[in-house]
Image (spheres, grey):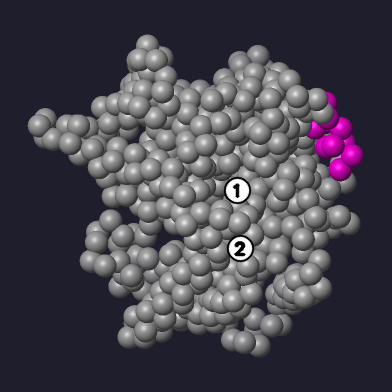
Amino acid sequence: MESLLAGLSLAFEGTTLLYLMGGVLLGLWFGAIPGLGGVTAMILVLPFTFGMEPQQAFALLLGALAISTTSDTISSVMLGIPGTIASQATVLDGHEMAKQGRVLTAFGAAFTVSAVGGVVGGVALALSLPIMTWLVLTFGAPEFFVLSLIGLVMVGGVSGNAIGKGICAGALGLLISQIGYPVAASDPRYWFDSMFLIDGLPLVPVVIGLFGIPEMMQLGSSGGALAAKNFGHAQDDSLMAGVRHALRNRWLAFRCSVMGTYVGMLPGLGASVVDWLAYGHGVHSAKDRSQFGKGDVRGVIAPEAANNATLGGSLIPTLAFGIPGSGAMAILLGAMTIHGLVPGPAMLDQHLPLTLSMVVCIILANIVGAGALMLWSKQVSRAAFINGNLVVPAVFVFLVMGSWIGQPDIRTLVALLAIGFAGFALHAAGWPRPPLILGFVLGPVMENSLAITAQAYTWGEVFSRPAILILLVLLVVIFVGAARAVAKRKSEFKIEIAGAASKGSLILSLGLALSALALFTWAFFEARDWTFLSRVFPMAICGVGAVVALICAAQDIRTLRRYQPLDDSDTLAGFGRRHAREGMIFGIFALTVALIPVVGLAAAMVGFVFLYLLGWGRFRWLTGLVYAAAVGLFLYVVYHRMLHVPFVPPFFLN
């Protein structure tokens, strides 16, 4: 109690609170911009913490990080683009709510449970520090592998009646994650002699490209607003409606918050899997599942409560063992070193007041940040009802710069477009995209765990571990439950809403299944001559993926044989006409990226904004000029001066 009071005193010092508020404001901004997030905000402010007192430095860093998992809800709901990797599941129902004109309801529910999740995570961290550190030590490589597998099966299992396509998409994500150096060998795989691929595909272009590019293609081609209703007609949409939904589902929010805290303790998983576990729990614990994926507010409440609680859990291995469970925790560990602090028992003994002040800062940041977002959400929500062609240019610039900041290479942008076009094809064919992302993120974790397990454990040792037995039972229950729901046709929901089924979409789906089958077959035979640890995981992926792809292809062929078009729009020609404008938008994006080596990155971005507004959006030249100038100023101030991002100069200045 004495340490707790001392921690509260440190956290509520005037200067500490001031730095905490500054971190919260920065985190609100960076979390809302796709591709930036709390980690980028921490990197930006880390140099400024050198001369601060430790409690002030950690207040600034944790304030920026804690609230970014709340403000990332803005782009997930408004644009259908995950603001950070922790908000992938929020896209599914949150963006559908925005399209229905229920933006404020989504925000009210999300911000309320985010505050709850942050508080629960902080309190759980404080209570768990003395007694729960053993749990981190009980989880070894075998448990990490099975838990990752549960995450994949969970997201595949909530793919509705498209469970086969969900599993196949997850296998594709796992296979893509195998590009580059393996974790347990020295020879790169599937890299096609390209130095760009030798370390694997970068994460950010894959995550934001798969969702962001298709959404902007669709929005630009329609020219309408995000929401289907006018602002004045959405009578049932309000912040208080969202708050009431959150209170009505308070036990779901509490359960998911606890889940987020203790999954967050597991290094390497945390935010990448917990939102899907929470979403899956929300689906399977609901009596009526039919509206999930179609704008069910519970699909926002479950992941948002879980991902905000993750920070509290991830601090446990960082503080107790010096094991950073994520990039953000690695930065925090660096800040501890700068201030002469050594993670371990000393943080729970000699520096316990400082440790508890960090807990208090997390709780305060979540409460203050959620309150601020509540105040601003009505203004933010109005963006859902403006002309979509005003949204597309700025968002495309954020997508490009968010990808570029991690790996400044023109091939990064080519990967962004390629993944984006693949995401468009998956969506048009009715294939779920989230399993692909989760497979890509979890692939290295699973392979590393499998390699360590194969070398350090016998089969008997693996299956004698109590945690393994519990997780395997959970895995079987989830898989059997999903299979029974599909067999009985009870899975009336999908984790992603695609266009109405037509002959064109079925043919495209068949093409994707056959392409996936060919890819898995080629990758399997390509891996035969590698070392055992290099080939075992990709060959296992390809074996399962090929079988599932073959089943998906057979189902599509059977459906095509029975399919009878209702009208001309259901034919292949109608499908092509419906997506022709989206293809033109993609062509504009591709041309912009192709011009970057010629005119330079900044000129290409500013020129794209101006010409898009004039040529495609049909706006006045003054509107285009002001908009383009604002984008140019933003690029200069934020990306060049603050983040020191290298810009490609025009070819004549090279």
Instruction: Of the two numbered discs 1 and 2 on the same chain, state the one appearing first in sequence.
Output: 1
Query: Hey, which quadrant is residue 466 in on the image?
Result: bottom right
Element marked by disc 2: loop
Is the Cβ of the residue at disc 1 closer than 8 Å to that at disc 2? no
In the foreground, 118 or 61: 118
Q: SS at mark 1?
A: helix
Closest to the camera, between mark 1 and mark 2, is 2
Instruction: Choose top left, top right, bottom left or bottom right for residue 565.
Output: bottom right
Q: Amino acid at mark 2?
A: Pro
Q: Is residue 60 visible?
A: no
Direction from residue 614 to residue 364 in the image, left or right: right
Compared across the picture, whether 214 is left or right of 593 comes to right
Look at the image and give the residue range highlighted in magenta.
239-249
Does residue 549 appear in the picture of this structure? yes
Q: Position of residue 154 (x, y in %)?
A: 69, 64
Screen quadrant of the C terminus: top left
- Give above or below for 256 relative to 153: above
Q: Position of residue 291 (x, y in %)?
A: 78, 50
Label of residue 358 in the image: none
Q: Disc 1 marks which residue?
A: 88
Going 41% across and 74% down the picture, which residue do you hit? 519
Magenta span dominant secondary structure: helix
Specify the quadrant that holds the N terminus: top right
Residue 273, compared with residue 152, is above or below; it is above
Which three-letter amino acid code belongs to the residue tagged 1? Answer: Gln
In this view, the residue farthest toward the front is 567
Residue 471: horizontal and vertical position, in percent? 73, 71
Magenta stretch contains residue 240: yes
What residue is at 30 percent from the left and 62 percent from the top?
Answer: 198
For the image, the number of numbered tags is 2
- The residue positioned 82% from the left and 28% from the top of the image is 236
Q: Dot 2 corresponds to which residue?
A: 565
